[in-house]
Structure formats: C-alpha cells, structure tokens
Amino acid sequence: MKFLCVACDEVMTFAERQLPGDGTMATLFACPGCDREMALLTNPMETQLVSTMGVKVGGREVPAQPMETVRSGLAEARPEVFEEIPAVRPEPLRVRWTDEAVTRLQSVPSFVRGMVKRIYTDYAREHGIATISPEVMDRARIDLGLEGM
Amino acid sequence: MRRIRTYNEVDHGTGSGLLEQVLEQHERLGARLAQVGAVVAVLSGKGGVGKSFVTAGLASALAASGRSVGVVDADLNGPSMSRMLGCEGARLGDAPDGVVPALGALGVRVMAMDLLQDTPDAPLRWKEPEGGHGALWQSSAETAALREFLGDVAWGELDLLLVDVPPGTDKIGRLLGLVPGLDAAVVVTTPGEVARSVVARSLRMVTEAGVPAVGLVSNMSGFRCPGCDALHPLFPGDAPARLAKRFRVPIWGEFPLDPEAGASMDRGEVDRLLEAGRLPGVHFRALAGALEASLGEARAATQGGAPSVGAPAVGGAP
C-alpha cells in the first residue's frame, strides 16, 4: 500500500502510528514535497488483520519475539508455558537403548563393555539421537572408526 | 482524465516497513528450515483417514532408526501429536534462538497448539477487539501461527521435519505457500470412493506444485481377524491403486485397521508399537524406508537432471 500525493506526484511517507486503545489505529503519512499530511484510520477488523500478519506499521523498534503472534493472540493461553532456557540446553539428552542394541552390546567383552557403551552414548548425544538401535551403532562404528567393537 | 502513476511505477516505498517485515519473516523461516534435511507433509485433504496416526508412527520409526525428527502439528484446531507422541502438557523452553519444542517419544521434537493452551479442551480462539469480525482475519492468524511453528521454533539440526496437515486442500495450499520447497508428501487415503475423490484433489496440488517425492499410504486397508488372522476388507473400493495409477505415484505403505495400535497412540505409547515383532512397527519401518529411499531418489534426480517422480498422468479420471 502506498499513498501518492497527486499534486506533487510524490509518495507520501510514514510519519507516525497511534493506537488509541479501542482496537482502531491512526497512521499518519506526509508528503515530502509539500508537507501535506493525511491520516489512514483503520477499524478494529482492519487493524487486527494487519496485526495477525505479524507486522507493525512503521516498522519495529525491537525485533519480533519468537512466536509473537501466538503468544500475544491466543485467547486461552496457558500461563507459564515457557520456561527460560539458556542458549545451550544444560541437561544432556536422555538416550534410550533398544532391546536389539542391548543384545548386541552384550556380545562385547565385559571388561570393555562400559567404555563401549559410553562411546555409543556420547556419539548419540553429540548427534541429537535419542535412541540407540543397531543401525545407530553401525553408523557410529563407521564414523568413529570403531570396527571390531 | 489525469493519469495517476500505478503502484509499480512508484519505485520507492512509504517507509511503513510492512513489505520489509514480511520478507524478513520469510527469510527467518528459510534460515530455520535450512537446518532441516527434509520437510515432509503428511496430508490427505480428507478427514478421519488416519493422518495423525501415520505421522506419529512414521516419526517414531524414523527416530528409532537414528534419525533426528521434529513434528509440527499443523492441525491448530484439533491437535493430537503431543498426546500420541507422549508429551501432552509438556512445557516449552524460551531460548534466545527460539522456542524449544517439547520432547516426545524416542526424542521426537514436537510443536503443537494444545501445548500453548490452558486446558485440554480449549477451542482455538484469538483475542479480538469488539466488533472484530473474526471470520475475516482468523485465517491470517492461523497462517501466522503455522509460520511461527515452523520458523520460530529452535528445532536444531533435523534430518526430517514432519508436518501433520489437517483436512482441507486449502491447508495444503497454506503449507505450500510457506514452504514452497516442500521435499516430500505422504498422502494418506482409505480405500473408499469418497476418500479417493478428495485425495485426488490433494494429489493434484502436491504434484502440480512439483513436490519431488510423493507417495500414498493406504490406511484402514482391511481388518485382520484376531481369531483366524485373515484380512477382511473394511471399505469397498480400490482408491489407493487408482490414485497411484492416475498420478503415477508409488504406494509406500498399507495399514490394516489395528484397534490395539490406536489404543497405544491414545496412551502416548507410540514407541511400543515399534517393539520387535509387532506388526504396526513393521509397517511403519517399511514406510520410513520407502520415504527415505524416495527422498534419496528425488535428490539424485534433481542433481542428475532426470525427471522427478509424481508427475500426473495425462487424461485420467481424477
């Protein structure tokens, strides 16, 4: 949407946005040629339509928060659904072993079994793999050069 | 009459920043999905054919084979993924790079609308001003919500991101609008004629959009008698075979009705279906294998310049 000052043949530029609190919005545009001003007045439906696009007329002072539309728009939002998490997840991924993988692990000599299990578990965590299956063990052996384990 | 310059003849914007913000949203979505090996839609167009059952089982089978998997429940009005994948009621994380999804069975990462709502039976409603004419903008809000589920969630590096698409071909169009580079579509049907006529529309959408890997799943393909183990038909019709022929797409899987499997999903114990010797697990593993093989073929075809799969046959009845 653009507004053209017909007298000057200039595009009017955004100057100010006002939200009076009744669901409506007033957006002021001005002509850079003659300084003429005009206000675009939108009703609640039109204002809401723009809002649901996740944009703000005139741009943003701060970047959009992740999932801003859902956070701010849901009528029956769950309170305290979000918990602060630092950039790196502090807890290591809980890794599960399938029955078939456990059976294969049993074939490893007992004196090194714990070490081998830890190697596979670390491999799974590093790759975001939650379940160790024989296929994962095969892939880890290739990736880590563990032929024979 | 004076001639007024048209929109496209005016070469600079108003400074309202709207277009820039929309473009920035799409860039953010693209950057997020760049960390995903393949975005796969599980869809039908028809309701009640078992899309969510297939999504949950497929996600679990892929995760059990060592893949890192995420699931977006695009059924914003009737979500079921968090229950089926065993993370109903889980809290979400608020990390600097996005919302941390819930962790479901076998480590599948899940984002669904019910995780954000205050009661399990809360209908999806948006805050609206008095006289807000919700019917006119609710679709826009739902599109924004889906965009945020895809692009504002800290999925991390994923091998596959499955999207459980609700009934209605418009929902397929919504997803394709957000993810034009959709990698694969798992199209779920039942054998009956009514399902066939609806699913044909969906297949047209995904094949005409050039989705490189498309396959059918025939759900409720029969009922296995627990007494004699014979497979009895549930619905008259051969929709999967006819659709496969019409659109030249493979049938990636067939699932007989299995009340026990459905009950496991209801309890959020989808991973138990994958235990050794259980039939649904065999079917889901086969489906996962067919999907991954087709993705590989589609990639190879793209790199080699060969024609992609999924081109509709000319002249066949829909």
Image (cartoon, coloured by chain):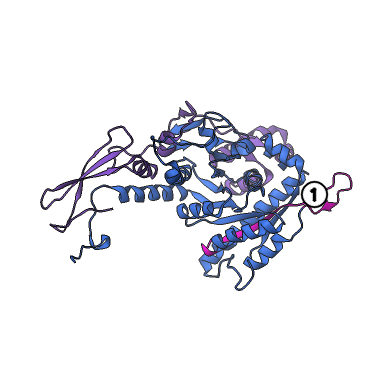
Report the span colored magenta. Answer: B208-234
Q: Quadrant of residue A59?
A: top left
Residue extending furthest top? A80
Q: Considering depth in this image, is A135 or B256 the residue closer to the camera?
A: B256
Q: Quadrant of residue B95?
A: top left
Residue extending furthest bottom? B315
Magenta stretch contains residue B233: yes
For the point 78% across and 52% down, the residue is B234
In this rendering, position of residue A125 left or right of residue B219: left
Q: Quadrant of residue B53?
A: top right
Q: Considering depth in this image, is B238 or B83 the residue closer to the camera?
A: B238
Residue B262: horizontal and vertical position, in percent? 72, 41
Residue B30: horizontal and vertical position, in percent? 43, 51
For the point 74% across and 39% down, the residue is A103
Letter of the chain that mark 1 sits on in the rendering: B
Label 1: which residue? B223
Residue extending furthest right? B228
Q: Considering depth in this image, is A93 or B98 the residue closer to the camera?
A: B98
Residue B28: horizontal and vertical position, in percent? 40, 47
Residue B291: horizontal and vertical position, in percent? 63, 55
Compared with B62, B308 (above or below) is below
In this rendering, position of residue B270 left or right of residue A11: right
Magenta stretch contains residue A48: no
SS class of the residue under badge 1?
A: strand
For disc 1, the neighbor class at 10 Å (few under 14, some 14 to 19, many from 20) is: some
Chain A color in figure = purple
In this rendering, position of residue B11 left or right of residue B101: left
- Badge 1 amino acid: Phe
Chain letter, colour blue in render: B
Compared with B53, B169 (above or below) is below
For the point 48% across and 26% down, the residue is A79
Asked whether residue B144 is in view, the answer is no
